[in-house]
């Protein structure tokens, strides 16, 4: 489908002829390259925030504001009685540190460079959609926020919530994470779990007089390596749980049998479980390999919540319809969890191959940008 709305297309989508989209087709690849060329590693987003704010300020139908280095914009086209729904589009401004890919390189129909996949292509698509669909069928809020790639406590969404929570009000949200322009529904949650294994010290010349805690880790590690996660299907999307050992520590000295060892587990759990339920399931799985007489223990160290797919919501259902592709589960974690935990159904949708995120080879294709842009323009023009 074309993102340009001529008189016929505008009429088909229920928007005023000639008034739905301003200007000609945007050069999304070139605009993405401009964003890539603005460094924005986490905590250093001021320059790109200035750029995005200036782009949005050029659209007279948008109210634009700055909250720290977060940029927010919204329409207020009619009373809630006439225009009962508001869609929130959101994307993060920051990137991970560079890996020899600091600058944009455009070759043919491909833009390479840091953040081109995650997620400056997605930002470009959302910015142009909210700028150019001047008479949407529903009210729209756009949020470009900082510090998604670092600890959640730094997130710009929390900064907005603390100082101007009204900007987060919406009936549904779409996060512009890279999904190859296929709707990725909800997200899985994640637990960090610490396992402490006990033992008894002895001289390594007489190890039979002690109990080696590091050796005792082998039973737990063996179980984790053999773990087979559930694959629940929710709203037609198959999630896939996983359990991985991500860190091991222990040891006293080269001539001492260690009396303690520590294992850190990462568990990805599907959105049909709460964090507590997921932790209880892992405790039950690991428990046969623990021995309280040696002081073994397991404890939950951190949780990020899962988000349900919520594809029954009319705006997210319309997003799936406009995309023309079957949705799939988001196996990683994204800020759809932030919105879902606050009662706002949310999904992931944006250009770029998610497998390239954070890699030296990040890139995005013109066709993918155009496709994602077309879908979002259609959603804004038609509503639910």
Image (cartoon, rainbow, N blue to C red):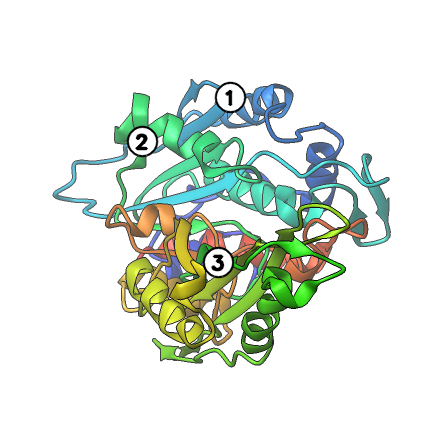
User: Foreground: 285 or 210?
Assistant: 210
Q: CA distance from mark 1 to mark 2?
A: 15 Å
Q: Examine the rendering and report whether any part of residue 309 can be seen.
A: no
Upstream in the sequence, badge 2 or badge 3?
2
Residue 103 drawn above or below residue 353: above
Return the x and y of residue 79 as percentages of the image width and height. Answer: 16, 36
Q: Which mark is residue 195?
A: 3
Q: Residue 371: name its quadrant.
A: bottom right
User: Foreground: 277 or 313?
Assistant: 277
Circle 1 sits in a helix, a strand or a loop, which is it? loop
Q: Residue 76: name its quadrant.
A: top left
Circle 2 sits in a helix, a strand or a loop, which is it? helix
Residue ID at (69%, 42%):
115
Return the x and y of residue 254 as percentages of the image width and height. Answer: 77, 49
Residue 226 drawn above or below residue 104: below
Residue receiving disc 1: 69
User: Foreground: 252 or 360?
Assistant: 252
Upstream in the sequence, badge 1 or badge 2?
1
Residue receiving disc 2: 167
């Amino acid at each position: 489908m074309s993102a340009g709305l001529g008189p016929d297309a505008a009429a088909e989508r229920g928007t005023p002829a000639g008034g739905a989209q301003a200007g000609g087709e945007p050069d999304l690849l070139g605009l993405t390259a401009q964003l890539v060329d603005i460094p924005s590693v986490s905590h250093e987003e001021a320059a790109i925030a200035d750029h995005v704010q200036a782009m949005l300020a050029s659209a007279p139908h948008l109210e634009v504001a700055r909250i720290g280095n977060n940029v927010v914009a919204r329409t207020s086209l009619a009373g809630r009685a006439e225009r009962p729904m508001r869609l929130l589009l959101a994307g993060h401004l920051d990137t991970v540190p560079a890996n020899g890919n600091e600058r944009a390189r455009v070759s043919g129909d491909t833009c390479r460079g840091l953040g081109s996949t995650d997620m400056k292509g997605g930002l470009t698509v959302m910015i142009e959609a909210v700028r150019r669909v001047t008479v949407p069928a529903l009210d729209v809020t756009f949020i470009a926020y900082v510090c998604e790639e670092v600890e959640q406590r730094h997130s710009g969404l929390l900064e907005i919530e603390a100082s101007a929570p009204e900007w987060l009000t919406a009936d549904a949200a779409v996060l512009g994470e890279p999904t190859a322009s296929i709707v990725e529904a909800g997200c899985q949650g994640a637990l960090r779990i610490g396992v402490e294994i006990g033992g008894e010290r002895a001289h390594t010349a007489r190890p039979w007089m002690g109990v080696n805690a590091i050796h005792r880790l082998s039973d737990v590690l063996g179980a984790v390596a053999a773990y087979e996660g559930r694959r629940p299907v929710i709203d037609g999307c198959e999630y896939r749980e996983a359990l991985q050992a991500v860190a091991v520590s222990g040891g006293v000295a080269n001539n001492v049998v260690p009396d303690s060892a520590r294992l850190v587990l990462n568990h990805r759990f599907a959105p049909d479980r709460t964090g507590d339920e997921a932790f209880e399931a892992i405790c039950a799985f690991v428990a046969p390999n623990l021995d309280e007489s040696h002081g073994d223990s397991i404890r939950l160290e951190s949780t990020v919540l899962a988000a349900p797919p919520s594809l029954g919501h009319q705006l997210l259902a319309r997003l799936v319809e406009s995309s023309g592709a079957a949705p799939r589960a988001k196996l990683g974690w994204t800020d759809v969890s932030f919105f879902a935990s606050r009662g706002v159904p949310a999904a992931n949708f944006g250009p770029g191959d998610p497998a390239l995120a954070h890699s030296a080879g990040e890139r995005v294709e013109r066709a993918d940008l155009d496709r994602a842009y077309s879908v979002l323009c259609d959603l804004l023009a038609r509503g639910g």
